[in-house]
Amino acid sequence: MPDLKEPDYESRIRAQIAQYAEPENLLKLPRVYNYWIAKHIRPKMSAVFGISNVLLLYAYCAVE
């Protein structure tokens, strides 16, 4: 177990807290993500499951 009084440990804690201070910046995906999903993933999901929305995929799997 790390020494809680160790300066390096405390600085890492502060850095991690600062990382989550602005959560809206935490999960920004690159613009190519939307292209990749529309071009490659959605058509395959539609062909296999007959749906094009990932939330519907989870609902579909939960019902079964």
Image (cartoon, rainbow, N blue to C red):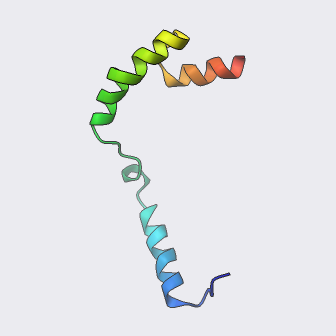
Above/below status of 27 relative to 54: below
The number of discs equals 0
- The quadrant of the rendering that contains the C terminus is top right
Image location of residue 30, percent across then percent down: 30, 42
**In the rendered view, would you say 52 is above or below 23?**
above
Q: Residue at x 44, y 73 (%)?
A: 15
Provide residue 53's location: percent of width, then percent of height: 48, 20
Residue at coordinates 36% horizontally, 46% vertically from top-left?
28
Camera-nearest residue between 49 and 10: 49
Q: Quick one: quadrant of the N terminus?
A: bottom right
Q: Is residue 37 visible?
A: yes
Q: Is residue 40 above or below residue 17?
A: above
Image point (59%, 90%), residue name: 5
- Side (left or right) of 2 relative to 45: right
Q: What x and y, as percent, mark residue 39? A: 32, 21
Which residue does the image show at 41% across and 19% down from the upper left? 42
Q: Is residue 52 visible?
A: no
Looking at the image, which residue sits at the far right? 64
